[in-house]
């Protein structure tokens, strides 16, 4: 994985961005699409709908980060719930207020609890 520092105008500081490496060893097919960039510091402090660096929706970056398994302990919150896609009880990764991503079937789905109530529960209120 290649990484570099870039200035994020939304956070007013340098952040780390990454691009996964394409397969390089024999017997592995080359990807038809170029690796998608990731922000390794995506998290609660990112409040805009669009990423100022990649010019794509924040939720899309969050899903990419979750799919790559590179979300750190402070980047994406999680909560248990039943997945609407696969029906399993899983730990959904919250990729946008009110939306979770299932690590088993990769479905992005609305959460059953409104974001305001979830914030209160996480704050211990």
Image (cartoon, rainbow, N blue to C red):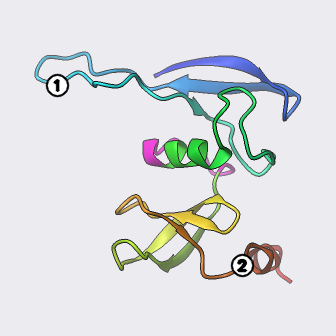
**Marks 1 and 2, how far apart at CA:** 43 Å
The structure residue drawn at horizontal position 65% and vertical position 43%, both measured from the top left corner, is 57
Residue segment shown in magenta: 67-75
Q: Which residue is mark 2?
A: 114
Q: Which mark is residue 49?
A: none
Q: Which residue is mark 1?
A: 28
Does residue 18 belong to the magenta stretch? Answer: no
Q: Earlier in the sequence, mark 1 or mark 2?
A: 1
The structure residue drawn at horizontal position 63% and vertical position 51%, both measured from the top left corner, is 73
Determine the main secondary structure of the stretch shown in magenta. loop
Q: For this view, does 79 lie left or right of residue 32?
A: right
Q: Where on the picture, by quarter, is residue 120?
A: bottom right
| Secondary element at image label 1 | loop
What percent of the width, then of the height, locates residue 44?
77, 52
Q: Cβ–Cβ below 8 Å for labels 1 and 2?
A: no
**In this view, 108 is above or below 15:** below
The structure residue drawn at horizontal position 10% and vertical position 22%, both measured from the top left corner, is 27
């Amino acid at each position: 994985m290649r990484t570099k520092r870039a200035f994020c105008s939304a956070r007013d500081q340098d952040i780390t961005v990454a691009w996964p490496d394409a397969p390089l060893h024999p017997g592995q097919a080359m990807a038809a699409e170029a690796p998608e960039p990731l922000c390794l510091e995506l998290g609660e402090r990112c409040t805009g709908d669009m990423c100022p660096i990649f010019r794509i929706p924040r939720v899309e970056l969050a899903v990419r980060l979750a799919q790559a398994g590179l979300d750190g302990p402070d980047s994406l919150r999680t909560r248990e719930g039943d997945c609407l896609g696969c029906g399993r009880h899983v730990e959904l990764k919250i990729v946008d207020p009110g939306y979770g991503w299932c690590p088993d079937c990769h479905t992005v789905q609305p959460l059953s609890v409104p974001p305001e109530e979830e914030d209160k529960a996480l704050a211990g209120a």
